[in-house]
Image (tube, rainbow, N blue to C red):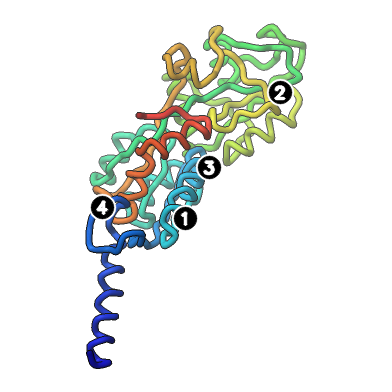
Amino acid sequence: MNSMMKNLMTASLAAFLAAGCGRPSGSTGDTPEGADSLSGEITVVGSTTVQPVAEVLAGAFEALHPGCVITVQGGGSSVGVTSAGQGTADIGSVSRDISPDEFAEHPGLVVHTIARDGIAVVADPGIPVDGLTLDQIRGIFSGSVTSWSEVGGPDMPIVVVSREEGSGTRGAFEDLMLGEGVTMSSSAILQASNGAILTTVSGTPGAIGYLSFGYLDPAVKALSVDGVAPTPSNAANGSYSAVRPLNLVTGGDPDGLARAWIDFIYSADGQAIVVEQGYLSVS
């Protein structure tokens, strides 16, 4: 075999392996046994609630497929919808339902629900209140209840801490707990992430806020709602009802690396990671 023919065969093999990078893991083909033809790079943008579990899922997938890079960024659920709809990111992450207006603006959106997540009301751990009724929660976060003494606590001002407009966690909290016609207090301290809510509530005397189950920490006190504790088991059995979907959205049916990663998330290994991170499996 002359050197020109060898060079042509080498180039053809390289092109074949590169073309195979879009096949999901586990697909069949002519790739030699033990070789991983899956490679490439995708970007995931959106919810700060989804971001930590997406980062862990991306890392686990990259360990299986060293030629793949999945970059996960925050920005908020609304940013996730827009990024996927406009094609500025391969995948958007959204910690709430997609609104009819968003579907109208981006009619090609495809939603992939990868987990379910509870939202817990959390307070300064120094406050001797272990639970609230839903009506009390609505009063506190709307600003009509301003002292802990009104809900069984000390004579101390309540400091309301909330997410900013556009946050999926805020949108879900307002839908699931505040309900129609109840608006967030204008005096609420607004924070840009679950992590910032955790830090602010844990470090501010008299503070109250709300967090994704995945962010619950002993630094804050998770309050029962109408006598039901905010735990994954109570969310799974339906007794704790403040539960929302965690979604990935794509601008059309995903393919290539995006399809392979989403398939991995739905696998037994992927859903085990979801549960380990404090969320509820969809399987």
Residue 196 in the image: state x and y as whole percent.
63, 38
Compared to residue 166, the image places residue 176 above or below, namely above
Camera-nearest residue between 200 and 70: 70
- Residue identifier under label 2: 124
**Residue 37 in the image: x percent, y percent?**
33, 62
Residue 191 showing in the rendered view = yes
First reached walking from the N terminus: tag 2 or tag 4: 4
Q: CA distance from mark 2 to mark 4?
A: 51 Å
Percent of width and height locating residue 112 = 32, 39
198 to the left or right of 176: right
Lower position in the chain sequence, tag 4 or tag 3: 4
Residue on which the image places disc 1: 71
Between 156 and 27, the one lying in front of the other is 27
Disc 3 residue type (three-letter): Pro
Alpha carbons under labels 1 and 2: distance apart:
34 Å
Q: Secondary structure at mark 4?
A: loop
Q: Mark 4 touching mark 1, by CB under 8 A?
A: no
Q: Nearer the viewer, residue 275 or 222?
A: 275
Q: Quadrant of residue 221?
A: top right
Give the distance between the C-alpha atoms of the residues marked 4 and 1, in whole angstroms: 24 Å
Residue denoted by label 4 = 27
